[in-house]
Structures are given as C-alpha cells and as structure tokens.
Amino acid sequence: MKSENNYERIVQNSKKFQHSQKNEMQKRITDLLQQLTNGIHERDQIMAVSLLGAIAGHNTFLFGPPGTAKSLISRRLACAFENPQYFEYLMNRFSTPEEVFGPVSIKALKEDRYIRKIEGYLPTADFAFLDEIWKSSPAILNNLLTIINEHIFKNGDERFNVPLKALIAASNEIPPENQGLEALYDRFIIRLLVPPIEQEENFNRLLDSKPSSDKPEISENLRINDHELTKWREQLHKVKLSTDTLLIIKYIREELAAQFDKLSVYVSDRRWQRAAVLLKASAFCNGRKETNHSDVILLKYCLWTTPENRETVEEIVMHVIKSCGFDTDIDLAELDREKESLDKEINKELYYSQDIYDTVEMGEKKYFPVLATFKDEYYANRDKKYQLFISFNKFHSQDTFNPIDEQGNTIDNIECQFDGQGSCSLKLRGNSYHNQYTPLTFKPKIIFHKGDKKLDVNKRLIYSLSQAVSDIRKQLIDILKQVEKKYEEYQQYLQSPFATQVDIDIAVSGILDQIDKLNLRIKDCERLGSLCR
C-alpha cells in the first residue's frame, strides 16, 4: 500500500513540476538538446550527457556495437557550438600518427626540422571523434594521452596549445588489460552505453525514415560560443556540492569498496574529482548554485569499468540515492532512542510485564494458597482437607517438592509437581493399603494478565510520561514539516535535461520513503500516547 501511495505522489508531482517555468539557462539547454536530437531515436539521454561533458570539458567514451549512431551523435554534438573545427577518424591497427596528427612537412624536413602540417587534423580541432580507438597504435595513443592531459601538442620544437574542447571516443570493446591503456581509459570520465534501438515503435520509425542528417538545424541563439563556454567553465566551479551529494558519494564509495572483490571497480581520486565537476556542471546548467539528487544520478555514467560490472554499478548508485533521502540536519537516531526508552518506561510503569498470580507472602517468599480436599478412593467419609501453600519459586520447575502449612512447616506426605504448562499435581500418600487418595490438579489463579493496565499508578507519573510522548511527537511533526517543505522545493529543482524522468522518480521515491517513515514514527507516538490514557 505504501509503495502505491508513493507512486501516485510521484506521478502527481512529476506532472505538476514537469511543465513548471524553467530558468533561462535550463530552457536554453533543453531547447538545444531538442534540436540536436531531432530525427534520431532513443539517443536523447546519450546526447544530453555528452553535451554536458563537452560543457564541463570532459571526454566521453561511447560503448556499443557498430551501426548504433555513435559517429552521428558526435557530429551533431559539435553542431551545438559556434563554428567548431571538427575532426573524425576511424582507427585500425595500421593507422599512423600522420593520419591523426597531420603529415610531416617535407619542406621543413629539408630544413632539418620535423614538423607536422596540423591544420585540419586533431591538434587544431575543437571537437574530435575517434572511432574504434583501442585498435590504434601505441604511438597514436601516447600522443593522444599528452593532448588530453596537458592540452598541448608537441610539433617539432614547438609546444602548441590545442583548442580541443571535447573528445569523443567509441568502441565495441574496452581496452585490453596489461597494454598500458589504463591511464588513457581513465581520462574518459563519461562512459555511455549505446545499444541498438529497443522499442519496436521507434525501430519501425527508423525503417520508414530517410537517414538522419549529421548537421541538424540549430538556432543561432542556442549555439554555444567560445566566450560563453570559457565563462561557464569558470562559473561552474563556484557551484557547491550539497551535504546530500557528499553523503551519497560517501555511501557509494563504501559500497564499491565492500564489493571490490566481486566487481573489481577502482575509482581513482582524479576520476572522483572530475566526476564532481560534472555534477557541478549539471547544477550550473540547471541554474542552481548547489547540486542535488538529479545531478548525482550522473555518477552511474562515470564509475563503471567493464560491461560486466556496468549494471551493478548503476544499481548501486541508484539504490544509494533512493535510500539516502536528504539531510534534515536532525538526529533522528537520538529521537528514536528517546522514543524507545519512553516506550519501555511506559510499559514498565503503567502495565504489567507478566501475569500476576494470587499469592501470599510468608517469610519474604511468595506462595500459592491452596485449600486441598483429597478424596479417599475407598471410603467417602475419610476425605482429607489441607490448607497448604505451594512455593511460587517452583512454578517454572518440574521437580517434585513438598508444600508447607500455615506455620511454615513442611507437609511431608503431600507431593507437588508443576507440569511446565501452568498446572500443579498434588498427591497425598495414605498410611495403609486402604488409605489411597485421588491426586488433585491445581491451576494458579491469575489476578492480572500480562499487558493489563495497573490501577494504582500515580497520576503525576502518567502526566509526565504523556507529556514526554507529546514532546517527541511535536519534534517529529516539526521535522516532517521541514522535510515536506524541502521536498516541495526539491520538486522544483530536480527536473534536469541530463537525467531521465525514470531516474528522477527513483530519487523522489527515496524522499517519499523518508516522509513515510516519519509518519510511522508519529503514529507510533500516538500509540504511546493512548497507552498513557
């Protein structure tokens, strides 16, 4: 029932805020993405995250089989920027550095200088797409690593600052182990799966349409110019990682560490730092000064290393986001301890914690008083009556014992034994063959059952306990109001072009779970309050 209520609330609030007024920056990015993805199917999220990576200055790795529009995504992405210099190359094991970085200048070579003609090649490109990147030669990859690390290309004796804004690489495989490619692979902060079209409706549309243009029509007012990009990259660093974000990252790190033997996922400090920049970029593009749950979702594209651990890593990220809710700055654990302690005190002081039996005290010990009449099996007029007392301490024992009389003397000819079920058998030994007596069964009388309310409790104590319950309930209600208010605020900011509605709904459901748990605590306080009445 709770999950159904959560789902209804998610749907209602999603509809409420999905069409809310977007800030200027967010609207521009949303409109830009709509034009970039026009005419292509099931690539909206890939394009969105790739665009965010380009804005943040991060490289993107597109993982997927051939023919899934990876090159089309890259070409279209470049169109989001004003007058981009674009370079694209399909790598193979026979590729040479000349094909990527430019041919050697024959004229310069004659002058004993080793200089490449780099114009039109990767060193002068604003955006570059390298398909089947892991098939290229070590010479190419080593130079590429230098360009990525330092944004510098060594051309002879000159050190040339490359204008590369974003590099997109693609492959249907990850780099093989022990080939020295780990450092380069680690520089691709964003790793996106590009699968074939899954929905039949979209697939049919693909079949019935002409090939998509790699140069979509982009409104000039939406294109990002160099000045804007430089300014944005400076401003995004002013965005603060929220307390919620840091907490989620903490738990993700702990979970990845706990499952290291299974997943073998190592995330370098550099990767964590670059991933944090990506989260800040997301918040910035959504017009916020602080990150939230929708930004942290992006971590699922940054932390996986192999196709085998990708899904598990994504599940870890989303599970942590959902389970964390958000920080209320209130120590709920302390309130829970107070409520638990109060619960125990109420039950101890106001209610019987065990059955109370009809007993008498004799010599600081408790006894069951029993008026026993033993029937003679042969003669009716020879019945025996005893006022005897059975030890309360023997109640939970199955040993045989003797009762005592009113003076505290042991009655040797009567034998008692409890059966472990609350009943006691009494046997009277006769003094001859003709004096045989029928055994009796005694069941102690319960005056008050376990859980019955005590009748003689001090009214001041009842009031004090009731007031303590009321105070905790009030604190929980105040916390609930804070959380609900923050939830309403979050609903206005969680919408993001870089996160799918499905993922956002998962994050929201975690917050709703948090609200539900607070409501359960409040209802439990109402239960405790009723116990005091």
Image (cartoon, rainbow, N blue to C red):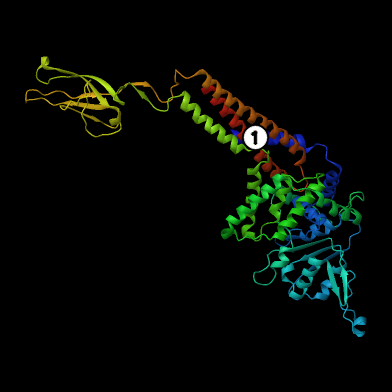
Q: Quadrant of residue 361?
A: top left
What amino acid does circle 1 point to?
A: Ile
Q: Is residue 41 visible?
A: no
Q: Nearer the viewer, residue 153 or 170?
A: 153
- Indicate left or right for 112 with 58 as reference: right
Residue 6 x %, y %: 64, 35
User: At 61% from the left edge and 55% from the top edge, which residue is drawn?
Assistant: 256
Residue 286 x %, y %: 81, 45
Q: Secondary structure at mark 1?
A: helix
Q: Residue furthest front?
A: 363
Question: Is residue 334 shown above or below 227?
Answer: above
Question: Is residue 88 shown above or below 93?
Answer: above
User: Looking at the rendering, in which quadrant would you find the N terminus?
Assistant: top right
Q: Which residue is mark 1?
A: 515
Question: Is residue 257 shown above or below 373?
Answer: below
User: At 11% from the left edge and 14% from the top edge, which residue is drawn?
Assistant: 381
Q: Nearer the viewer, residue 417 or 209?
A: 417
- Indicate left or right for 466 with 182 as reference: left
Q: Residue furthest left?
A: 433
Residue 305 x %, y %: 66, 60
Residue 201 x %, y %: 72, 47
